[in-house]
Image: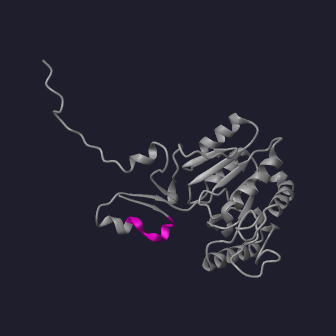
C-alpha cells in the first residue's frame, strides 16, 4: 500500500499497478470559500484573506477561491485589500506573518500566474508581480488578491500554491454552489456566515472531502479529496481503514447444537 501526498504529475497509480498495490493520494486543491451575505460579511472576508496567506499560500486545502455576493464585490475588495496589507512578509526568523515560497521554480510559477491574471482582466486588488517592497532577494511573494475573477480564468482553475487569492462573484446561493463545484479538484471547502443552518445546508452541497464552517481544524475528522484531489482519507478512524486488510473466516464458530 502506498500513501502519497503531492501532485498528480507523480503518476503513483501507474507505478503501483504492476505490483497490484493499493494507493491513497492527497493531491492538489482549489478550495472554494463561500462567504454568505449577512452581518458578518466583512469580518469573514478579512478572515478568509488571512487564512489564504498562511504558510505563504503553500497549503493544498487553502481557501483560494473566495465567493462573495456580486453586489458586495466592491466592499469585499476594500476589506481584502486591508487584510492583505496586514500580512507581513520577511525572514521567518523575524516578526513576520509569512516567509518565502519553497523554491525558485515555484516563485517563477506564481509570478507567471499573477501576470496571467492581470492579462486576463481580473482586478488586482492587492499585491502583484515581484517581491514585496524593501526585499530585493529571495523567493518572497507579495500577498496578492484578485477580484472580479471569472471561474474560467486560469487563476481560478489552476492551483497556484502561493499567497494569491481569487475573489469571484455569485448571484444566489445556488449560483455560489455551482461555481464552487465547477473545478477538477475537491479537497477542501469552506462556508462562512451567521446563519448556521444555512451554512450547514451549503456545506452539504459542496463536492469536496471536507468543508469547514467558519474555519476550524480537527485531526479527528477525515481529510482527503474527491475528483483529482485524490482518494482515501487521512486522520481519525477513517485514516486507518486504507491500511487494513479484511479477512473472512468461514466455519470459525462451532456448529450450534
Which residue extends farthest front? 93
Which is nearer the eye, 180 or 208?
208
Which is nearer the eye, 170 or 211?
211
On whether residue 113 falls in the magenta region, the answer is no
Question: Where 99 falls versus 33 (above or below)?
Answer: below
Q: Give the percent coordinates (x, y) of residue 157.
A: 63, 65
Q: Is residue 114 left or right of residue 204?
A: right
Quarter placement of the N terminus: bottom left
Magenta portion: prevailing SS class: helix
Question: Where 62 falls versus 138 (above or below)?
Answer: above
Residue at image coords 64%, 46% = 212
Q: Is residue 42 left or right of residue 11?
A: right
Give the residues drawn in magenta, as a range. Answer: 6-13
Q: Give the percent coordinates (x, y) of residue 67.
A: 73, 53
Which residue extends farthest top? 257
Q: Give the percent coordinates (x, y) of residue 126.
A: 81, 67
- Residue 21: quarter of image: bottom left
Amino acid at each position: 500500500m502506498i500513501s502519497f501526498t503531492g501532485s498528480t504529475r507523480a503518476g503513483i497509480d501507474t507505478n503501483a499497478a504492476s505490483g497490484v498495490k493499493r494507493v491513497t493520494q492527497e493531491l492538489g486543491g482549489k478550495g472554494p470559500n463561500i462567504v454568505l451575505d449577512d452581518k458578518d460579511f466583512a469580518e469573514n472576508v478579512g478572515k478568509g484573506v488571512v487564512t489564504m496567506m498562511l504558510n505563504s499560500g503553500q497549503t493544498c486545502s487553502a481557501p483560494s477561491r473566495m465567493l462573495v455576493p456580486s453586489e458586495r464585490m466592491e466592499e469585499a475588495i476594500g476589506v481584502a485589500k486591508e487584510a492583505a496589507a496586514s500580512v507581513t512578509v520577511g525572514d521567518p526568523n523575524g516578526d513576520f506573518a509569512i516567509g518565502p515560497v519553497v523554491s525558485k521554480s515555484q516563485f517563477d510559477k506564481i509570478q507567471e500566474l499573477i501576470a496571467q491574471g492581470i492579462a486576463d482582466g481580473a482586478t488586482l486588488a492587492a499585491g502583484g508581480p515581484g517581491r514585496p517592497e524593501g526585499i530585493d532577494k529571495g523567493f518572497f511573494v507579495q500577498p496578492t488578491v484578485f477580484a472580479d475573477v471569472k471561474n474560467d480564468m486560469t487563476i481560478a482553475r489552476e492551483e497556484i500554491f502561493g499567497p494569491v487569492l481569487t475573489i469571484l462573484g455569485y448571484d444566489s446561493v445556488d449560483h455560489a454552489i455551482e461555481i464552487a463545484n465547477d473545478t477538477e479538484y475537491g479537497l477542501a471547502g469552506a462556508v462562512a456566515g451567521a446563519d448556521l443552518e444555512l451554512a450547514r445546508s451549503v456545506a452539504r452541497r459542496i463536492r469536496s472531502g471536507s468543508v469547514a464552517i467558519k474555519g476550524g481544524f480537527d485531526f479527528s475528522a477525515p481529510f482527503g479529496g474527491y475528483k483529482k484531489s485524490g482518494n482515501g482519507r487521512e486522520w481519525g478512524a477513517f485514516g486507518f481503514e486504507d491500511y487494513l486488510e479484511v479477512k473472512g473466516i468461514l466455519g470459525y464458530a462451532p456448529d450450534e447444537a
